[in-house]
Amino acid sequence: MAVGVFDLFTVGIGPSSSHTVGPMRAGAAFAAELADAGVLPSVAGLRVDLYGSLAATGRGHGTFPAVLLGLEGFAPEEILPEQMEERLAEIEASGKIQLGSELEAAGGVGVVLEYGIEDMVLHPLTVLPRHTNGIRFAVSGADGEVLHEATFFSVGGGFIVRDGEEETAAVELEASKQALPYPFRTAVQLLEHCTANGLSISQVMLANELVSRSEEEIRAGLLHIRDVMDQCKDSAIARYGLLPGGLKVRRRAPQWHTRLREEDPNRDPRFWQEWVNLVALAVNEENASGGRVVTAPTNGAAGIIPAVLFYATHYGPGMDTAGPEQKDDAVVRFLLAAGAIGVLYKEQASISGAEVGCQGEVGSASSMAAAGLAEILGGSPEQVENAAEIAMEHNLGLTCDPIGGLVQVPCIERNAIGAGKAVNAAKMALWGDGEHRVSLDEVIVTMRETGRDMSSKYKETAMGGLAVNVVEC
């Protein structure tokens, strides 16, 4: 299906969309295949092989437990953190999983297998041809014969691709795009639709979304995304202590929130950046804790769009006197415009840190946020495109080298920096007339090529950068 706003903004579990959300979806998809094929009752053995980045940084990124829960049939959109903790404690205590037990197709009857995290086979130095985030599943019967096997790739943002189905998926994608009133792959095509039809970027995106949902459903869905972002922030500012994982990173959101409430009780515009920083930090602290977040478009960059959206709805023109409905309208327009830019990155490059480095995660999120803000601030389609271009241009070459494979350092602060860049990019674009020397399409292609040239040790493998130059404990 054509990439839409609800593909780019999905509710999931931290700390990583490509290492947690994607693997959970892959495990659930494999379990569903077993149930649909009628193979599930005959399964007596299971093998899971993880390749490349998933194997190298999977422990810190929560990959291993996510795979197990996915194999039981849990979906990242539905499972709550407390459910995860409870079920994982049972798996660890018993050393057994219940394959397919949460699948509707299996009737809630899973196959109990003696299998745990330690039984997974890791291949950190082996990268499969399609993508560095590879997972191979195989099940066998009582006689040891392989009953079913499949390979999946987690390609960023929680998206998964099954090996061998790339061509079919590409054909289906093109067919679904033809059903859209305004199909686009490039920023040039997007702007042509705006000019020819007198539409804003958010209006073009809305028209395309209306092919599969009613306007009421789109509005409700986007406001739900906003609500989950808010809940994520609120959850983080209520948590004190250290983040999990052994790095002993202190949670800063609670203290920062208390201080801001004291120093800025009336929301003085002088403090806008402190509030933006707080929201970005809070969301990513919650993500680092394995909490419930919105992939925007990835978990590692989940704090940028909520932070810039907070700026738009609190410091945008007229927002100090706007009613709830007006603010909701702004949220919908922001997320639609941001989603349109996200489509360009998915179509022309990548949002996977393991594929192109953090420029594909924080960079794309900053670009999307800049576009959403420029739209809310009254920018023309050309100014919105310029804002997105400026934000990505100054994230080119950004590496992905989290210490200990944990989405904490430098990821949490990097979200705050990315949010600040987005606000500045939008303001810079609005001081111009939309004309600029470098196009968004050129920057996206440059990001893709930079990612291709980037050494693998800087692409979520824990083999370079801060991941090796900073002592973990």
Image (spheres, grey):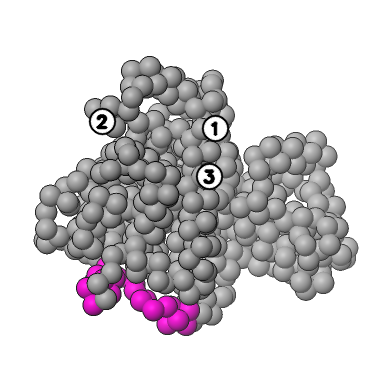
Q: Distance between the residues labelled 2 and 1?
A: 25 Å
User: Pointer 1: what residue?
Assistant: 235
Q: Which amino acid does label 1 sit on?
A: Ser
At mark 1, the secondary structure is: helix
User: Pointer 3: what residue?
Assistant: 228
| Residue 375 seen in the figure | yes
- How many residues crowd mark 1 within 10 Å: few (<14), some (14–19), many (20+)? some
Measured from the top left, where is residue 33 in percent x and y?
72, 69
Disc 3 and disc 2 in contact, CB within 8 angstroms: no
Magenta span dominant secondary structure: helix
Q: Distance between the residues labelled 3 and 1?
A: 10 Å
Query: Of the residues tagged 3 and 2, which is closer to the observer?
Result: 2
Measured from the top left, where is residue 136 in percent x and y?
63, 61
Measured from the top left, where is residue 374 in percent x and y?
25, 52
Magenta residue check for 190: yes
Q: Front-most of 454 and 246?
A: 246
Q: Front-most of 367 and 394?
A: 367
Magenta residue check for 425: no
Q: Is residue 436 left or right of residue 375?
A: left
User: Pointer 2: what residue?
Assistant: 269
Which numbered disc flags the more N-terminal residue, 3 or 2?
3
Please give the range of residues in magenta: 174-196
Q: Front-most of 346 and 248?
A: 346
Q: What residue type is labelled 2?
A: Pro
Measured from the top left, where is residue 19 in percent x and y?
54, 49
